Structures are given as C-alpha cells and as structure tokens.
Amino acid sequence: MSWLKAIAGGVVGAEALNLVKEYVEKQGGLDGVVKNFENSGLGKQVHSWIGLGPNEKISEVDISKVINADKLKEIAKNAGIDLEKANALLAQYLPEVIDKATPEGKLPPPDKGA
C-alpha cells in the first residue's frame, strides 16, 4: 500500500497509524475516503489535505458525520482502541496522513494488489 509507506516513518504513532490504515482500507483506499468526506459536506477540508496549501482541521463531530457509529466501532475494535479515542485520533491524524500521502498535491494512483 503505497500511501501507507509514505507516512509509516512519520510522526503518527503506531496506534493512530493502525486506526487510519484500518479506516482507509475499509473505504477501498484514499479515493474512497475523499468520496466519503465529499458526500458528508467536508470536501473543502479533505481537498485541503491533498492540496499543497495548509490543511484545514476537522473535529470529532466532523468524523461522526463521515463515519457512522457502527462503522467507527468496528474500526476502533479492529485497531484495538476504544470508540472515543478512535474518534479523537482520526480527527487529529487523518488530515496529516492524507497530506503526507499526497506530497505532489494529488491522490496517488490506486494500488494494484500491493
């Protein structure tokens, strides 16, 4: 997964990295994450993370708009953390992870079985 390699050595801790990885994989990759944010009215924010300018922040409330409670519970459980912490970690680190995975200001091509 090329996007994951791009951020694996960064400042994101292992717990947050596992959580973000779990979420992105459940969405079918970064394209799916972007679509989810766009469909939830947060397209401006997600595109700021991909673009070359400053990253707009999101809140835990924003995360709950994008990821329904059942999906968030499943993602948190699979990552081995509680729901509240998962929500906070995604709000904090998802913008940074997507920013680091898109250094040229565009989404990487979808992985082909990598």
Image: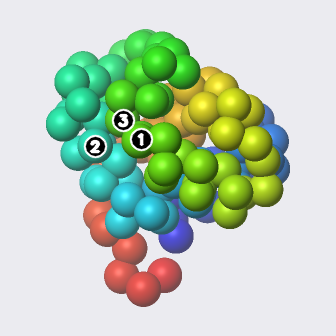
Q: Earlier in the sequence, mark 2 or mark 3?
A: 2
Kindly indicate whether the residue at mark 1 contacts the one at mark 2 (C-beta within 8 angstroms): yes
Give the labeled residue for mark 3.
66
Give the labeled residue for mark 1.
67
Residue for point 27% across, 24% down: 42
Residue type, numbered disc 3: Val
Give the labeled residue for mark 2.
36
Residue type, numbered disc 2: Asn
Q: Is residue 1 left or right of residue 37?
A: right
Q: What x and y, as percent, mark residue 47?
A: 28, 29
Q: Is residue 114 left or right of residue 31?
A: right
In this view, 95 is above or below 108: above
Q: What x and y, as percent, mark residue 101?
A: 49, 46
One can see residue 82 in this view = yes
As helix, strand or loop, the secondary structure at mark 3 comes to helix
**How many numbered markers are drawn?**
3
Q: Quadrant of residue 40?
A: top left
One can see residue 10 in this view = no
Residue for point 78% across, 47% down: 81
